Image (tube, grey):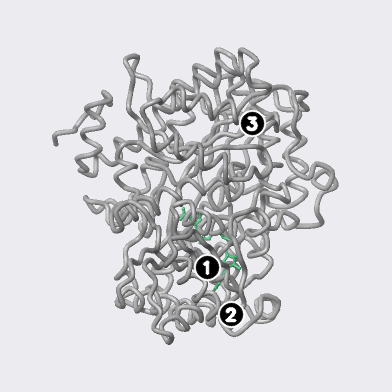
Amino acid sequence: VGEPSAQWREYQGAPTGTDIECKGWRQEAALRMLNNNLDPEVGEKPEDLVVYGGTGRAARSWDAYDVILAELRELDDDETLLVQSGKPVGRFRTHERAPRVLIANSNIVGKWDDWEHFHELEAKGLIMYGQMTAGSWAYIGTQGIIQGTYETLAALADEHFAGDLRGKIVVTGGLGGMGGAQPLSVTMNHGVCIAAEVDESRIDRRIETGYCMEKSDDLDEAIENAKQAAEAGEPYSVGVHINAADMLEGMLSRDFVPDVITDQTSAHDELEGYYPSGYTVSEADELRDENPEKYVEESLDTMARHVQGILDIQDAGAIAFEYGNNIRGQVKEHREMEHAFDFPGFVPAYIRPLFCQGKGPFRWAALSGNPEDIHRTDEAVVELFPEKEQLHRWIDLAQEQVEFQGLPSRVCWLGYDTDEDGLTERARFALRINELVADGEIEAPIVVTRDHLDAGSVASPNRETEAMRDGSDAVADWPILNALLNCAAGADIVSVHDGGGVGIGNALHTNNHVVLDGSDLAAEKARRVFTTDPGMGVIRHADAGYDVALDQAEKSNVSIPMRDS
Ligand code: NAD
């Protein structure tokens, strides 16, 4: 990727305040969000352009980064910039209501769509791994996933433990960009978390930012402390400096059975995400450089032991689920472990009913950089939805316990229920924010975006579309339609990626941004985008035959032409 750009060194994160470098706030929002992804406080290895999720990058090279910034500064209010796998490749005059930036990352034609071809193309400098929010400039740090992780664990607690994790021990692995949200999400649900992490600096980072409480090199000590906390009903979390596969075998040999077992190591990428057992991080990094084939073999061997450990702990009585890193798919494919899928993925287990209702991780960032702007949006969401007690609890917890990273941001799962004017929850909220910007109650525009993991924006058979009721798991027309619809509705940035979360060839997914600058144009776009985009979730799941989605469509007047066929 070359030497880090001098501009990046100067920015050290998104520019803030009310003066802009670009010709309009839509272009400025793109420039700020790209730099926010690469804020040393937000991204995992920004000097390599890596934002999170193994090697998820924000731009193909530092040269490409510099040119993207130059293009954004030049871009007129009626022009559209095209970015192909992190490289700016063209700029056209379109119109004011069209997106300002269109992005496609990591997409490969079906027959060639795997890591091997990807790495060949990457070595030739032709493609980049965009993960989900890395290459679409929508990553907001670990705070971006925290509510999703919190909600998933709350749904698990509802189903298995009378609504609370108090006194329960959750065991997991991986304290990276996304996985780092796990300990805090467990303690927010009053539980105890033991997380294996091979890279000590990642544990330190989570402790510094308040996501994890303690660090240990000693598994016995970690288990003992966890048991004591659970018995006392106290929230507690510890990052154990150990390989996850070794930790699970260590727990089994000590007859220690947690209540819940999952994992968020970067198993989707056996070469640059997951660490094989028997090496320190620097030894493994050396092995990767010197002998990548050996690295991959050892990495997959460790993964097979890791999955076997999860299955054995499940057999011993724990609730097990895969947390979206494709570890089951990896060992089934590469180690012919047929029983790898004997524990469920988190989407069919806990999230799908939300997707059926068009609910998903809606998030927004204050382009001013002023935390007060987010506090004003917190008040607005509470005022707008007085009946949503769980949402109020989330806002209180987030204010108390989630530190801002980079541009102050907030995440909420909002849905599709419509009011008397036919406005969805997301649209109502966005319109209210737009008014607050127009009235000057919020200092600068707010950019609203979302994860690619959303109700109608992803096809990923080992994750978001695992075990669909009608067997449509691998049908990728849905995310493509979603991206096209976002352009038609006038989102300001639209992106389409391959391979996020679960690795190249395993998923297609899309994302959008809308800039709320207080203008009538922003209100028009918000009304459309926040109806059509989550609406795709309702029709996608209604088409697959889910009653919850069919009911939501009926309730919210969503037109489904062949609904009874
Ligand atoms: P990351 O690359 O930033 O962090 C992964 C961490 O795992 C690193 O800190 C690494 O040191 C550690 N690790 C790797 N192998 C290990 C091993 N064998 N034992 C212990 N630690 C090990 O990635 P991330 O952004 O945290 O994402 C983690 C995984 O979760 C990815 O596969 C990602 O695609 C997936 N993911 C899930 C969701 C979700 O909603 N569930 C969302 C985003 C990402």
- The label on residue 218 is 2
Mark 2 and 1 residues: CB-CB less than 8 Å, in contact?
no
Picture coordinates of residue 26 (x, y %)? 64, 26
Mark 1 and 3 residues: CB-CB less than 8 Å, in contact?
no
The C terminus sits in image quarter: top left
Q: Return the disc, 1 or 3, that comes first in the chain's sequence.
A: 1
**What residue does disc 3 label?**
366
Picture coordinates of residue 201 (x, y %)? 69, 66
Q: Amino acid at mark 2?
A: Asp
- The answer to which image quadrant residue 477 occupies is top left
What is the count of numbered marks?
A: 3
213 to the left or right of 464? right
Q: Return the disc, 3 or 2, that comes first in the chain's sequence.
A: 2
Q: Judging from the image, what secondary structure is the residue with disc 2 in?
A: loop
Residue 204 can be seen in this image:
yes
413 to the left or right of 87? left
**What residue does disc 1 label?**
195
Picture residue at 85% right of the left edge, 47% below the top: 6
Q: Return the disc, 2 or 1, that comes first in the chain's sequence.
A: 1
Q: Is residue 471 above or below residue 544?
A: below
The N terminus sits in image quarter: bottom right
Instruction: Estimate the spatial distance between the alpha carbons at disc 1 and disc 3, rounded to whole Å.
Output: 32 Å
Q: Amino acid at mark 1?
A: Ala
- The answer to which image quadrant residue 248 occupies is bottom left
Residue toward you, 17 or 540? 17
Picture residue at 57% right of the left edge, 42% below the top: 400
Picture residue at 65% right of the left edge, 53% below the top: 209
Picture coordinates of residue 519 (x, y %)? 59, 14
Residue toward you, 312 or 210? 210
Residue toward you, 157 or 288? 157
209 to the left or right of 6? left
Instruction: Estimate the spatial distance between the alpha carbons at disc 2 and disc 1, rounded to whole Å.
Output: 12 Å
